[in-house]
Structure formats: structure tokens, C-alpha cells
Amino acid sequence: MINSSSPEVARNARPYLSGDEDALLLNALHSGQYNHSTVTDHFEEAVASILGVPETVAVASGTAALHLALLAAGIGQGDEVLVPSFTFCATVQAILATGAHPRFVEIDPATGCVEPTALIEALTPHTRAVIPVHYGGRGVDLSDAQATFIERGITVVEDAAHSFGSVTQGGPVGATGALTCFSFGPIKNLTCGQGGMIVPRNAQEADTCRRLRGLGIIQSAAWRTDAVTYEIDSFGMRVQMSGLNAAIGLGQLPHFERTSARRQTLWQSYAHALDGIPGVSLINVDIDRTVPHLCAVRVLENRDRVFSEMRAKGIGVGTHYPPNHQQPAFKAWYRALPVTEQMGQQIMTLPFHPHLTEHDTAHVACELRHAVTDEAGH
Ligand SMILES: *Cc1c(COP(=O)(O)O)cnc(C)c1O
């Protein structure tokens, strides 16, 4: 068992290409349209139709999606946004980009996700938005807090960077009516190379997002070819999704169900193989509704030693994520978050991507068992 693994276990994550990307990317390359293009339009329409929503707004990254969604929701200078400290730093940087500031909240250590009650407890008079992060792919259901949020004029912006393809109580992630942000970065469930997408709540919000991503210019590039001028009536940046990136995403989509099933199977094989390892607790992603992005465990004791031993054996473990409230850049918003701080010491992610086999997951679990029980080790 120990020696039957492939070199794939050395990678914590890795993009998975399904074969259709090459031709579509070459077509887009030879089309000579490298900005937002008709290929980007097709990708937006394809994702909207999969989700069953009227429209989507493609952007350059998941970070840009969060930034623009917050701006479109009217978030800016002086506003406070509730966010778990236990997330990728991009979530926090997107808040700061708007001029608003984060208020870090605790998570449930069993799932790595925020709970409605913790959010309600953390509200202040300055809170204007909350960002639940779908950690590991698990959709966060905030319906219990929805009435409070509506009453206080608080917008929910979902960081669904991990959860393309997952489903919550309210329906598929992105189709629940919430303002939702996906990432299609290199290692996400679906990749465009780089990319992100906003699912707006209505046509007006969609329009605002489109102006924000395209330098505030009202007219489309196609319209402008026949015109002597164009009009700008708002702030905007250049964070469109290139047609080159959209082509990669379009190549991934027809195979997405197969890749998702693969991710679920691998996660379940890890769950089986990890069962009963002392001092190791698997983060629960609610696998029946989730397309998992991570396989994360808590190593209850000596995580750093276990991490080094796994790395020394060529196994690509990671730590998603070191808490943000303890980062120098965000120290102005530090507050004691004991659960998150402990999570930061215990979290370890196992190699997880569709190139792995069930032999690989068994091998990783076997090495993990050795590492945690090897007390004489160091
Ligand atoms: C990847 C990620 C982002 C940012 O997406 P990019 O496409 O890398 O900009 C935001 N939040 C979380 C939780 C992520 O994992």
C-alpha cells in the first residue's frame, strides 16, 4: 500500500483538463479578440443556463468578483463587513479594496464555515454586508439570519470560490437568489486559468457590475466599432474576463459533471481511509450536496511536526488557511477568535485533485496514520 502511490500525491492541488480546452483556446487565440469577447459572452450564457439564472457577469478573478459585488451592493468607506478570519486572504483584500473594513468572525470547527448565530452576535451598527465563505465547497445556509439582515439593510455576498457545483438547502450555489461570487482560478472546481464570476440579484445589479468591470464604459466593444465616441458615467476598472480564459472554461463545462463526481468519490475514499486515525478529525463538507474543493483535516496535536513529516515523504499537504486576523496587514481589525486560532494550529489539507486515484488516497491516509502515531519521531 505504502509504495503504490503516484507522483500526483506531491501536489496539493492541480488543474484538471478534460481535453476540449486546447482547441477552444487555439480558436480564441487566432480570433485576435483577447479582451472580453463573444467567447466570454458564451461562457457567461453557458454558466447562467447551467445554474438556471437569467445572467452572470464574468470577471478577471474571484477576487475581482468579490470586490465588484461589494461595490455593486453599495459597500464603501466606513462600512463594516463581517467575514470569517478562516478564509483565503483574497476575501479580506476585496473588502479593503472598497474602502470598507472587515470584522472577523468565528467558524464552526467541524465545517470551517460561519454559522448564522455567530454572525448575528457579531453585528454592529456599522455592519453593511456579510461574506459567508463556502469552505471546502460546503454551501453555507444563512436563511435563519435572513430576516435580521433584511431588517438591518445588510447584504449577503457569498464567497463561493470553492463551491461551484455545490447545492444548499436553498438550491444550487449561485441560484439561491443571493449575490454570489465564483472563482475559476487554476485549482478551483472549474478553471479558466484565471477568472471569476458574479451572479447578480437583478438586472440593474448586473448592469452595475458590467460597468465596474469595463472601465465604466456604457457601450459594448461591438457597438463602439461603428461610433465616434463612447460614454462613461461611473467609476470602473479593467477586470474583464479575457476570451482566452473564457475558452478554457467553455472547454471544462461539458465534463464538469464527471470531474465533480470524481472529486466526490475521492473525498469519500479519503473519509473511509481516515476513519479511526487517532487525533485526526475530518472537516465535514456535507458530501452529498457538495463538490469538494479541499480535503481538510484537523490534526489535534503536533500539526507542524506531522506536516513536516508528510512533506518529507513527498506528500503535498497544505494549510488552508492561516487565520487572517493574525496577519500583519489586518492587525488593525484583530480581535480574539479562539476557535479560529486553534483551527490555524490544527488545519492540514491533503493532496486533492482529480488526477489522484483511490490508491493515492489510501497511501496518504496510511502515511498520516504513521505520522500522527510516531511520537518518537522528533
Ligand atoms: C481562490 C479564492 C478567492 C479568490 O479567487 P481568485 O480567482 O484567486 O482571485 C477568494 N476566496 C476564496 C475562499 C478562495 O479560495
Image (tube, rainbow, N blue to C red):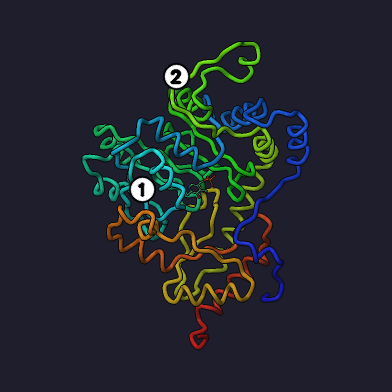
Quadrant of res 159? top left
Which residue is the site of mark 2? 233
Q: Is residue 128 shown left or right of residue 352?
A: left
Residue 83 disc label: 1
| SS label for mark 1 | strand
- In the rendered view, tell whether residue 10 sits above or below residue 143: below
Name the residue at 45% across, 39% down. 66
SS state under label 2? loop
Q: CA distance from mark 1 to mark 2?
A: 31 Å
Q: Residue furthest left?
A: 125
Q: Residue furthest bottom?
A: 376
Q: Is residue 327 left or right of residue 57?
A: left
Dot 1 surroundings within 10 Å: few (below 14), some, or many (20 or more)?
many
Asked whether mark 2 lies closer than 8 Å to ligand 1, one says no
Which mark is on residue 120? Answer: none
- Residue type highlighted by circle 1: Val
Percent position (x, y) of residue 150? 28, 32
